[in-house]
Image: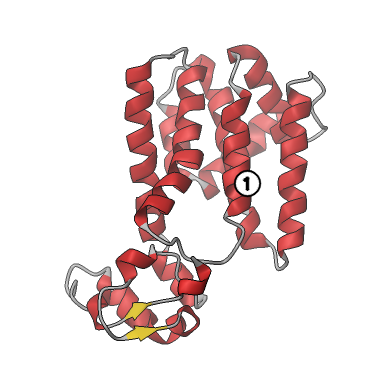
Amino acid sequence: MSTWKNSRPHENEKRDYEGFLCSLLLPAESRTSAFALRAFNVELAQIKDSITQKTIGLMRMQFWREAVENIYCDNPPHQPVATELWRAVKRHNLTKMWFMKIIDEREKNLDDRAYCNIQELETYAENTQSALLYLTLEMLGVRDIHADHAASHIGKAQGIVTCLRATPYHSTRQKVFLPMDICMLAEHLVSISAAGKYRRVLLESLSPVKPTCLPLCSFHTPERC
């Protein structure tokens, strides 16, 4: 328990700074559970960027799928995040479905491909960011359809903003994950594989100084949709 208290919240601070700050605003009796939820999300989110083969990513996702199943059978694996997640589930009677939705959606996202359209990105955000907010509401004892409706919109907005914020980082790795229907802004089409050559354009397109640079080119890979 001391290992968790001394290290895991600080890991959250490094890898999910905004989430860490928000967790500090919660009632003191709920913070440990909030840190557990955030740590679970971080564990899944970092899988995609830490693997070189999709098979390894699938294995890690399967570990967490089985871990959640075992948590709800009162038999959590000997892993710090899983152990604290089990305590949070027992303490707040959290819904297993939301954990599984997060895992399933993260697993689908292991493929390196752009979203076909904004609706696909919203679905991803709903099943990851919004699902995490639903669990946070349950943890706080809030089970209200209106609160869930607000959480759905906030989660989708958060997912879209995260996608936009990550564009410069992904462009340095010659990858683009922006929705294809948004990227297709001009008649001159280039492939996603050439995105590295246009990262300057992408970076400038996000700058408030030159917001009109992006329409100079777009990215088209219909076979990925």
| Kind of residue at disc 1 | Leu
Q: How is the image coloured?
A: secondary structure
189 up-or-down from 62: above or below: below
Residue 207, visible in the rendered structure: yes
- Residue 50: image quadrant is bottom right
- Image coordinates for residue 116, horizontal then vertical, percent: 43, 62
What residue sits 63% from the left and 25% below the top? 96
Q: Is residue 169 left or right of residue 95?
A: left
What residue sits 61% from the left and 32% below the top? 99
80 up-or-down from 223: above or below: above
Q: Is residue 87 left or right of residue 139?
A: right
- Image coordinates for residue 151, horizontal then vertical, percent: 37, 30
Residue to which mark 1 is pinned: 44
Residue 3, visible in the rendered structure: no
What residue sits 79% from the left and 18% below the top? 74
Q: Is residue 10 left or right of residue 170?
A: right
What residue sits 36% from the left and 59% below the top? 164
- Image coordinates for residue 218, horizontal then vertical, percent: 33, 78
- Image coordinates for residue 52, horizontal then vertical, percent: 70, 68
Front-most of 91 and 53?
Answer: 53
Front-most of 132 and 37?
Answer: 132
Numbered circles on residues, count = 1
Classify the position of the N terminus by image quarter: top right
113 up-or-down from 22: above or below: below
Q: Residues within 10 Å of mark 1 (few under 14, many from 20)?
A: some
| Element marked by disc 1 | helix
- Residue 156: image quadrant is top left
